[in-house]
Amino acid sequence: MATTTRTDTSIWPLLRAADAVALRAWLVRIGFDEGVLVTNDDGNVQHSEMLWPEGGRLMVATADPTNDHHRGGPGSASIYVVVGDPDGVHRRARDLGAEIARPLEDTDYGSRGFTVRDPEGNSISFGTYAG
């Protein structure tokens, strides 16, 4: 099988949140940059993007139980973010008081990383493994 070089930029996971604005603020504090923010007349987030400085993005929206697209509700996602400095992100997470679900560690498959739970209960792993 031939190997190819690839750039993964086309998959954007969606985090559904009870308080999407607060979740966006938390994501900024852990290291994401703010992107697009679209709210409706009620102030609920219909669509938003959070940009990881090293590449990739997350969408964040207010959970809406009447919308089949939002099935699963807040706190039901598990995301992996490739980072160059997991120790630095871990320090920011710890300084935020984030719940550390998996400690910072070196794995047997050559990655260094950890997992946190965001304020909505989503599991976000940060690590050096890039595939």
Image (tube, rainbow, N blue to C red):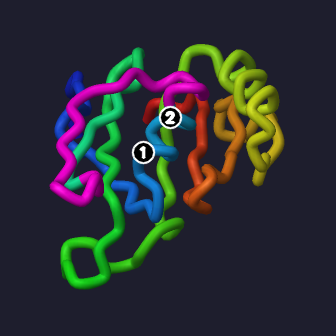
The image shows residue 55 at horizontal and vertical percentages of 34, 22
Residue lying at 66% horizontally and 31% vertically, measured from the top left: 110
- Secondary structure of the residue carrying tag 2 is helix
Provide the secondary structure element on which disc 1 rests: helix
Residue 106 is at least partly visible in this image: no
Q: Could you tell me residue 68's position as x and y percent?
A: 20, 81
The answer to whether 9 appears left or right of 87 in the picture is left
The magenta region covers 28-45
Residue 9 inside the magenta-drawn segment: no
Can residue 113 be seen in the rendering of this structure?
A: yes
To which residue does mark 1 refer?
Answer: 21
Quarter of the image that includes the C terminus: top left
Q: In the rendered structure, does residue 29 fall within the stretch colored magenta?
A: yes
- Give residue 25's mark: 2
Q: Quadrant of residue 86?
A: top right
Decide: is 98 above or below 16: above
On residue 30, the disc is none
Residues packed near mark 2 inside 10 Å, few (<14), some (14 to 19) or many (20 plus): some
Could you say which is closer to the camera, residue 102 or residue 24? 24
Q: Mark 1 and 2 residues: CB-CB less than 8 Å, in contact? A: yes
Q: Quadrant of residue 114?
A: top right
Q: Quadrant of the N terminus?
A: top left
The percent position of residue 53, horizontal first and vertical second, equals: 40, 16
Q: Residue at x 29, y 74 (%)?
A: 64
Q: Is residue 56 above or below residue 11?
A: above
Crowding around mark 1 (Cα neighbors within 10 Å: few <14, some 14 to 19, many 20+) is: some
> Which amino acid lies under the numbered mark 2 shown in the image of this protein?
Ala
Q: Residue at x 71, y 23 (%)?
A: 92
3D distance between C-alphas at marks 1 and 2: 6 Å
Q: Looking at the image, which residue is at 66% across and 53% down?
A: 117
In the picture, measured across the screen, residue 60 lies left or right of residue 112, that is left
